[in-house]
Amino acid sequence: MTSSDIADVVVLGDGLVGLSCARAVAARGHSCVLVGRHRIGAASGAAAGLIAPTVDPARGAALAFTVAARDRYASFLDELRGATGHDVPLALDGILRLPKDERDVRAMAGDDTAASRWLSSDDVAALEPALLAPFGARFHPRDARVDNRRLLQALNAAIALADLPRVEADAVRLEMADVHATVELDSGRRIRTAHVVVATGAWAPYLNGLPRPLPVRPLRGQMMALATPTHLPHPLTRPVFGHGGYLVPRPLEQQVLVGSTSETVGFTTGTTDAALAGFRRLAGRLVPALARADEARSWSGFRPMTLDGLPIIGLDPEAPALVYACGHSRNGILLAPLTGDVVAALISGDPPSHDLTPFSPSRFVPQTRALS
Ligand SMILES: Cc1cc2nc3c(=O)[nH]c(=O)nc-3n(C[C@H](O)[C@H](O)[C@H](O)COP(=O)(O)OP(=O)(O)OC[C@H]3O[C@@H](n4cnc5c(N)ncnc54)[C@H](O)[C@@H]3O)c2cc1C
């Protein structure tokens, strides 16, 4: 056994959640090995980058965590910039949500709150002149968007600059003992560790040796990027939800992202003509200037969905060497930085900064038994 085969912490998974956990754990002085092998359909590069805890809000402690995750973003990116020089775009301009029709207006207009307020169609036009919003819109002024692909690059650079050992391999098996764990890789290599963090996205349930079933399923999301028309290089400033989908501006690439589908198709990758045609119709309905925009690219990815849409974060109650950081469902971009913080606190034996009860690994036991 060499020294690289023993570490305080082994993080499994090289998406935004695994990278954030590895960075936070190493920042607390633990020796850490990151094990990951990219798969087609990994979610972190496929996502739209919406930081939207108040658009379809969770409740109670879960809502408090998602809002704190949003508010953690700016300082997290400052830290990354300081460490790597990478400047990851974060736009804190808010997010708009459009009603379908007048009946929907009655349901959505409601009272203004600290999280959102109703805007008339004139107010919307002042914010987003190219957007067609005849009925007005709900505005979530503190929600945001981040460029998740640039964030992945910055986090990978941070891991490299910190000299954090990294193994490009598949973790195939865990062996749990009282106070340590052993991770076996597909090469046959074994790494012994005090803590192993499972951050393998939609693939989390497939690790052999987990002490409990993980009800995480892949939910395919297709996306399309439209090249913005040359006469209108920035047709949108902020993301817009409406008519069953959303648009997200990516001004640096001169693109607007259009998404997304939610499909139970296992791990089948790819896009469909029907979905892409639907995205075109959606884009043209929301921003008519995009109706004939060229497609720049299209792709799909797998959301790691749990039964309640909330992540699984915490120590395994029967095997505390095992830490879960998976099942981030539709909000893994939003939640990755704060997930890293709380996982590092748990591993250090510190009380986490937030109530993690809604994310407990044992909350699914009755449902899981009922399903089997
Ligand atoms: C189309 C789409 C749009 C989305 N939009 C948003 C959004 O706007 N905002 C938001 O907050 N969230 C969004 N999400 C959800 C978000 O992308 C995910 O919740 C998040 O990226 C999950 O990150 P992760 O690191 O857990 O998983 P992933 O990014 O999937 O990374 C897991 C990594 O682990 C690797 N791996 C798996 N198994 C093993 C193994 N056994 N050994 C080694 N490596 C392994 C995989 O190959 C992969 O590289 C979206 C998702 C999709 C698909």
Image (cartoon, grey):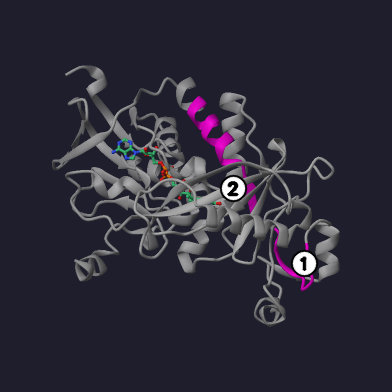
Q: Which mark is residue 180?
A: none
Q: Secondary structure at mark 1?
A: loop
Q: Quadrant of residue 252?
A: top right
Residue 149 in the magenta stretch? The answer is: yes
Q: Which residues are magenta?
A: 132-157
Mark 1 or mark 2, whichever is nearer to me: 2
Return the residue nearer the eye: 243 or 32: 243
The answer to whether 152 is drawn above or below residue 355 in the figure is above
Decide whether residue 111 is among the magenta residues: no
Reading the chain from its start, which is encountered first: label 1 or label 2? 1
- Inspect this view and state whether residue 182 appears: yes
Residue 177 in the image, given as x and y percentages of width and height: 13, 41
Element class at badge 2? strand
Farthest residue, direction top: 2
| Residue visible at 77% across and 57% down in the picture | 288
Q: Residue 142: in sight, yes or no?
A: no
Residue type, numbered disc 1: Ala
How far across and how far down the image is residue 164, in percent?
A: 40, 24
Quarter of the displayed picture in which ligand 1 can be seen = top left
**Above or below for 292 versus 63:** above
Structural crowding at the residue carrying mark 2, measured as other residues with C-alpha within 10 Å and reported as few (<14), some (14–19) or many (≥20): many
Circle 1 packing at 10 Å, graded few (<14), some (14-19), many (20+), is: many
In the image, residue 84 above or below residue 334: above
Tell me the tag on residue 224.
2
Assign the N terminus to one quadrant of the image.
Answer: top left
Q: Is residue 160 left or right of residue 137?
A: left
Residue on which the image places disc 1: 133
